[in-house]
Image: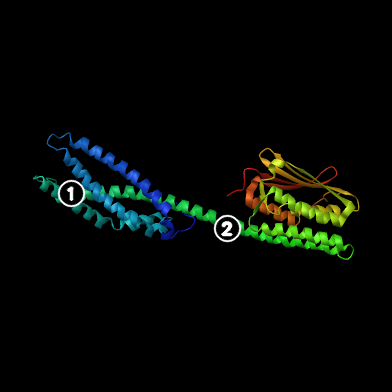
């Protein structure tokens, strides 16, 4: 198994990882020894001279000592976590102790059996010690290899889960950093355009300019509030568009009409803050400023199956052949992709009498 990155023992010993590994191994261990006890009892009780407690002692002593050694292996496994991407080294780190552990296992197990037999006034009879050491060492090695394989599998899965969580946290942090960067690009652009509008009226109509400064103040307060959360209710986002539209309508007075068609059931739906304002900016920049004809601007928010569709359209202009999106549209697309993945989209298209920018946002929510 190839691990994406090596984790430290500290990462490996996370509380959740240890708990899940311990429970899984304890369950497997219990089932294994129940099967071993069952097989030993069935075989031993066929001999009339064998008492019922003897097979329990034989298998129980082996199980007890073997469990002790496996608990040690489980406790120290964090030291070898960094080798899980190199199985030969991982197994070698454990198996190098096998000769010493096997001898200790035989000595302790048979000492326990001798002790119990002595307590009940009987003599423990067994094969010669050469055979015993060879047989029990091979048996112990086979069992140890089996359980080291199980431990390797459980630990590899645990590290894969930890690595996956770390990757998700990294992706989330990267996405948040990208969002902060994109918002930082949007707000200066938005403020620059709004102040230009106010500046154009300062020397021609002070009262109107004063009203626009007040409206701009409301707009900036909403913009600053959006720093607290990436998402905002649709009603708040539409309020931002209304304030911006009021500023631009004062500038162009008789040349533009704004109309709103909003599904009231969608007003509490969360949307990315300041996502739609660049779309309305684009309408005034390319659809209003470049013509002296009257322009109709329509903002529509409606439900389309399991998604919300927001359309910002204007009359009187068309997309030029070979049209390329500006910074505002690219930022909007990037934000939608970061928050919703491929479930959201932003499309700009020519219509019969103008241009429409269409945002499609899933109602199921943002990606984690």
In this view of the protein, which residue sits in the foreground, 297 or 52? 297
Report helix, strand or loop for mark 2.
helix
Check residue 68 in the rendering and tell me which mark sits there, or answer none: none
Marks 1 and 2 sit apart, C-alpha to C-alpha, by 60 Å
In this view of the protein, which residue sits in the foreground, 76 or 227? 227
| Crowd rating for badge 1 (residues with CA inside 10 Å; few <14, some 14–19, many 20+) | some
Seen in the picture, residue 334 relative to 35 is either above or below; the reply is: below
Seen in the picture, residue 175 relative to 297 is either above or below; the reply is: below
Q: Please state the horizontal and vertical placement of residue 198, each as a whole percent of the image.
A: 82, 62
Residue found 30% across the figure and 52% down from its top? 70
In this view of the protein, which residue sits in the foreground, 73 or 367? 367
Check residue 132 in the rendering and tell me which mark sits there, or answer none: 1
Relative placement, left or right, of 180 versus 120 is right
Q: Please state the horizontal and vertical placement of residue 320, each as a whole percent of the image.
A: 83, 51
Q: Which residue corresponds to mark 2?
A: 173
Q: Is residue 285 visible?
A: no
Report helix, strand or loop for mark 1.
helix
The label nearer to you, 1 versus 2, is 2
Q: Please state the horizontal and vertical placement of residue 51, each as a whole percent of the image.
A: 14, 38
């Amino acid at each position: 198994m190839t691990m994406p990155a090596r984790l430290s023992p500290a990462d490996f010993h996370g509380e959740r990882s240890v708990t899940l590994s311990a429970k899984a191994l304890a369950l497997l261990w219990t089932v294994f020894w129940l099967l071993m006890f069952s097989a030993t009892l069935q075989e031993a009780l066929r001999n009339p001279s064998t008492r019922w407690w003897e097979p329990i002692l034989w298998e129980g002593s082996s199980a007890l000592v073997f469990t002790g050694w496996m608990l040690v292996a489980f406790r120290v496994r964090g030291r070898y976590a960094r080798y899980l991407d190199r199985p030969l080294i991982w197994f070698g780190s454990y198996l190098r102790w096998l000769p010493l552990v096997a001898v200790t296992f035989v000595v302790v197990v048979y000492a326990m059996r001798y002790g119990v037999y002595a307590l009940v006034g009987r003599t423990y009879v067994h094969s010669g010690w050469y055979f015993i050491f060879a047989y029990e060492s091979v048996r112990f090695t086979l069992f140890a290899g089996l359980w080291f394989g199980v431990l390797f599998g459980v630990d590899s899965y645990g590290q894969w889960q930890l690595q996956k969580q770390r990757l998700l946290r990294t992706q989330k942090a990267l996405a948040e950093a990208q969002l902060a960067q994109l918002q930082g690009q949007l707000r200066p652009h938005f403020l620059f355009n709004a102040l230009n509008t106010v500046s154009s009226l300062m020397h021609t109509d002070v009262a109107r300019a004063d009203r626009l400064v007040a409206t701009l103040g409301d707009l900036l307060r909403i913009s600053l509030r959006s720093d607290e959360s990436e998402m905002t209710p649709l009603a708040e986002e539409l309020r931002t568009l209304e304030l911006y539209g009021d500023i631009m309508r004062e500038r162009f007075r008789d040349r533009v009409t704004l109309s709103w068609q909003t599904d009231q059931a969608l007003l509490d739906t969360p949307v990315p803050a300041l996502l739609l304002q660049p779309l309305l900016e684009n309408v005034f920049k390319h659809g209003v400023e470049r013509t002296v004809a009257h322009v109709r601007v329509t903002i529509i928010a409606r439900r389309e199956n399991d998604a919300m569709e927001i359309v910002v359209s204007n009359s009187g202009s068309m997309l030029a052949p070979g049209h390329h999106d500006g910074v505002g549209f690219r930022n909007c697309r990037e934000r939608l992709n970061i928050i919703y993945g491929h479930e959201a989209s932003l499309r700009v298209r020519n219509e019969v009498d103008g241009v429409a920018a269409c945002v499609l946002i899933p109602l199921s929510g943002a990606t984690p």
